Amino acid sequence: MNELKYPDILVTDLTENQAAEELEILAALIAYHDELYYLKDAPEISDSDYDALRQRNQAIEARFPNLVRADSPSKRVGIAPKTGFSKVQHDTPMLSLDNAFEPQDLADFITRTRRFLGLGEATIVEVVAEPKIDGLSASLTYQNGQLVRAATRGDGEVGEDITANVHTITDIPTSLKQNPTPEHIEIRGEIYMHGDDFNQLNAARERAGESLLANPRNAAAGSVRQLDVSVTAQRPLKFFAYGCGEIPADIALVTHEELMAQLINWGFPVNPMIQVCKDMQGIQQFYDELTIARPTLGYDIDGTVYKINRLDWQQRLGRVARSPRWAIAYKFPPEQGQTVLESIQIQVGRTGALTPVAHLKPLTIGGVVVSRATLHNQDELQRKDIRAGDTVVIQRAGDVIPQVVAVVKDLRPADAQPYQFPDHCPICDSLAVRKSGEAVTRCTGGLVCPAQAALRLYYFVSKHAFDIEGLGLKHMEMFYHEGLLQTPVDLFRLQQRDANSENPLAKREGWGDKSAQNLFQAIEARRSISLDRFIYALGISQVGQTIAKLLAYTYGSFAKWRSALEQAALDAESEAYLELVAIEGIGASIAGDLLDFIREPHNQQVLDQLAQELEIQDLARPEITDSPIMGKTVVFTGKLTAFSRAEAKSRAENLGAKVASAVSPKTDYLVVGEKPGSKAKKAQELGIPVLSEQEWLKVISDQ
Ligand code: IVH
């Protein structure tokens, strides 16, 4: 969330330009996080932060339907399965569980069940209570006792075929032990990883310089979904069976409890904590006992699950939408622990956001060693007054990145100093700026900052910028890390570098002679670029297509634009500054971003280099010759309803008119909206034509 450009601006306050920019970043960010989550099983953000990204995307699109992008995240859910895994249609859908949030919800669950089945108060409704294992669910199909297919849950209807991977998990029998052997049965359960095994795996990854996995659940999911089965085989995966798809007709079972016993007989591990509860007291007691046992289990559980014991009742209860009526989950509150915060360090995100991260004396929460926690932003740090040396309360909930909940002030060392948030980027040393009204501090060295480089380069070649096809975000990341592309100017040196490289593009997987040549040609074709595209490509905060065009029209040439900004940056009273803020559509805020950009020496260097490699074409405002309002002076007054004031002005100017703010004898037309004030009176006195919005529209649509 921190990485958005305008994270704190309400969607209703975004300008169209800002909205377009934000949607572009959101598309790239959501695609990036989808890939981490779905394909790499290594999310960097919590589920709720991810949901917030999607919600913001949706809200902006709802407000600006004309800005919905072809690659909008709203047009797809998740991501296509990894290539290599074939799809599997589940015989019976794999449902999810309804959630209880307080004890009363559990009592209501029992009451609902009674009502639905028409049971009296005297009838005992037995419930099987189980731990809710925090792993990934799997469906295992046995045909005549042999494991023939294993699948992930996927979207509940269609999953991925992980048969080969599952064959490497020793907890899962390849053939059912003991009779009776049903002809066909689908066993369901959870694949998970022990906390100790997860810690060891991460320690080994750290030694090998590999990225760390977020938690045991992601580690388990990532380990199962490996195209190379030998990798899965090395991972310490475990399994608990907790049910089956359809109860086979050739097996006599009356209760879920009996099914669990049968699963054990067939050779499946079934969780030893599972209990039958006869009433609400038993249900509550199970929850309390499990809360106490939880830290000692050695694997993550995120709550309890209660299932109606009688299978015929389960059958009758059926399901509502995506969850069965016969089961309910009750989640635990997040787990907490205390430790010492050793230091606060700054991470720089892909859009330049500086995020403080707490480095902790490692502590174990729920079997997982935690050594880092997010501190969100400067305000959060100040509000909680978190300091290096403090003892802090850490919280870890499921797959959420650990958080610092509070400081134990009584344990604060006497010499602990308040944290000073940096004013320079710790990665590239460029100025870091926090604009008024924003929570996020950002590095201004966008074009050179290693943390931002890949996204910036991607932006630089995007459709409305240099429009170079064939370079995705992934390529940018790879080329950046290889040192092939570091700043935009390297694009124009790519062909030459590639020719001298030991690993030329043409020889790489997924490339080839033709696509490498196409890319080089596309880059060459863009050595000549129009000034507005050039300005847009620089990715300056708030400078979208429209602002870039305005700047290009105003200054006409690269040299004039650059020197005007340089002068304006030196002196806020200079004519250059006044001219900049006077451009219709550019106020002090956008001017501030432009000047932050130009003040940064690294950016100046990139501009020098680009100017040498490129031919940046001058841009003149299009000449309008046959406009009915060419050369006329127009004044708008009152509340306009057909268009915004900015749009009205811009359309008039595009048709060659001058827009003034006060009525004078030089005024040719006064256009009045609702509730016109004194201007209308003055115009009448001067005999100047006064037009309604409709009349004005007619005048300008004549041409
Ligand atoms: S029963 C229709 N029992 O929780 C209900 N699920 O939100 C089928 N889970 O996708 C699931 N432990 O991965 C059931 N003892 C348990 C479970 C359990 C973990 C997971 C399962 C499912 C999710 C439901």
Image (cartoon, grey):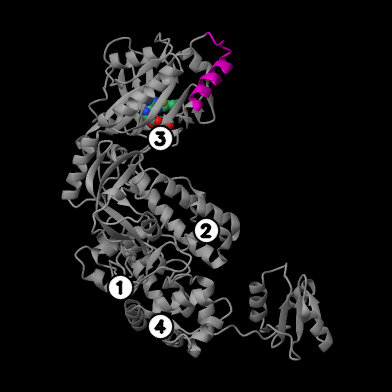
Residue under label 1, please give it.
Answer: 490
**Location of residue 202 in the rendering, given as x and y in whole percent from the top left corner:** 21, 44
Amino acid identity at mark 4 = Glu
Q: Residue 388 falls in which quadrant of the image?
A: bottom left
Question: Predominant secondary structure in magenta?
Answer: helix
Residue under label 4, please give it.
Answer: 615
Residue under label 3, please give it.
Answer: 159
Q: Is the Cβ of the residue at disc 3 closer than 8 Å to that at disc 1? A: no
- Of badges 2 and 4, the one in the foreground is 2
Q: Is the Cβ of the residue at disc 2 closer than 8 Å to that at disc 4? A: no
Which residue is at 54% across, 52% downward?
58
Which residue range is magenta in the image? Answer: 104-122
Q: Is mark 1 within 8 Å of ligand 1?
A: no
**Location of residue 627 in the rendering, given as x and y in whole percent from the top left corner:** 70, 83
Is residue 346 or residue 508 the one in the foreground? Answer: 346
Amino acid identity at mark 2 = Arg
User: In which quadrant of the rendered image does the N terminus lie?
Assistant: bottom left
The tag earlier along the polypeptide, 4 or 1, is 1
Q: Residues within 10 Å of mark 3 (few under 14, many from 20)?
A: many
Q: Is residue 217 visible?
A: yes
Number of the label disc, if any, that sits on residue 69: 2
Q: Residues within 10 Å of mark 4 (few under 14, many from 20)?
A: some
The tag earlier along the polypeptide, 2 or 1, is 2
The tag earlier along the polypeptide, 3 or 1, is 3
